[in-house]
Every structure is written in structure tokens, then in C-alpha cells.
Image: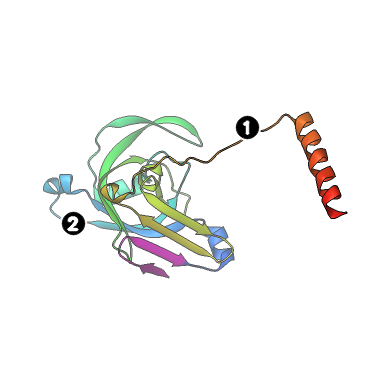
Amino acid sequence: MNRALRNHCKKQLSPKELAALGPTLEVEITIAAAHLKFHSDRLKYRTLALIDTGADGCCIDPCVASVLNLISLGKFPAGGTGGGYMADKYLVNFHFVGSDIGVGNLSVMEANLEKRPFKMLIGRDILSNAIFVYNGINGILEIRIVPPGMQSPKKPVNHPVKPPMPSSQNRAARRQAEKKKGKKKR
């Protein structure tokens, strides 16, 4: 079940389902507004997208590009678990199904996801403006996108931090603290 609250998307599964599927949400991918003038029809591709904190940027499977008849921006260096390769780059729009969260004119790289249940990876280019919660105990997956202009300014936090003591000093300090506690109890 996807539930939407403006810039918020939440999915509730059983903990076992969430562990098996991973952090996936249903998305709808469309042709980017910048390329609509080259297309006479407004095709849509619905699929699961994996939230991938290891991916620098968003990726789509070549089948998505083929179905949507996307126009390549050219070949660019890419990398993944299989090593480096040259991949096509495209512009797309996408939104999380059942929510108001969407991204327009997003640059995505092509990645081979053919043996996966998802055909899109959502990378750190999107996650850098998001709050993402993976609650495996309760089977809850939640993402909230914060528009760049709406982020709170980062304020420096002044917490006094003591540098760690070398282990021999740690033992001596612990012994002294234990002696003091022992004297106070008497």
C-alpha cells in the first residue's frame, strides 16, 4: 500500500516482504519535458524503483528507454558492480505512484537491470534532498523529498568533544573512577 501526503510517500509491507523486495517503490517514468517536442505521444512506463544509496545517480534499464523511445544525450562513463562501461544518458520525468513526489528533467544513466524486479535505481542525486526511512522491524518504507529551497540552513553545532585517550590511559581512568565509586558507597 502506497500512501501519499504531499511530498511524502510511505509503503507498508510485512517485514519479510520488505526484506525480500528491498526498499522499492512504484514509479511512473515519462519523457522529459525538454524532449516532448520530439514525441507525438505521451508514453508512460510503470515499474518498481530500488532506493540505492550506493548509486551516485539514478539509472534506468535499457528496456525503459526503448519503450519510451528516449533520445540519448550521448555515451558517458558509468560504473557498477560489474565494473566500468560506457552508457547512454537520458532525460526523464518520474513520480512515485500514489504521491505528489515527482522529479522533472532528471538525467539518468542506462544500467542493465534485466534480471531484477525493478527497472529504475534511485540514487544519491535524489536522496541528497530526501529523508529516507527503512524500518525493517515494522515493514515500513518511507521517503520525503525536501525541495532545495526549503531545506533548513546547516548550523554549526558546538558539542565539546574530548579526544579519545590511548587504551592504557583508558584503563587507568576507569580504575580511578571505580575507586571513587567504591569510596562513595561506604
SS for tag 1?
A: loop
SS for tag 2?
A: loop
Is residue 4 depicted above or below 75 in this figure? below
The image shows residue 172 at horizontal and vertical percentages of: 80, 34
The image shows residue 118 at horizontal and vertical percentages of: 43, 54
Magenta extent: 1-11
Q: Amino acid at mark 1?
A: Pro
For mark 2, what is the residue? 42
Q: Magenta stretch containing residue 51, yes or no?
A: no
Is residue 20 depicted above or below 51 in this figure? below
Q: In the rendered image, which quarter is residue 88 located in?
A: top left
Q: Amino acid at mark 2?
A: Arg
The residue located at (55%, 64%) in the rendering is 17
For mark 1, what is the residue? 163
The residue located at (38%, 69%) in the rendering is 3
Counting residues from the start of the chain, the first of labels 1 and 2 encountered is 2
Q: Name the one closer to the observer, 76 or 123.
A: 123
Distance of label 1 from label 2 (alpha carbons): 59 Å
Circle 1 residues within 10 Å: few <14, some 14–19, many ≥20: few
Q: In the rendered image, which quarter is residue 49 located in?
A: bottom left
Circle 2 residues within 10 Å: few <14, some 14–19, many ≥20: few
Residue contact between numbered discs 1 and 2, judged by CB atoms under 8 Å: no
| Quadrant containing the C terminus in the rendered view | bottom right
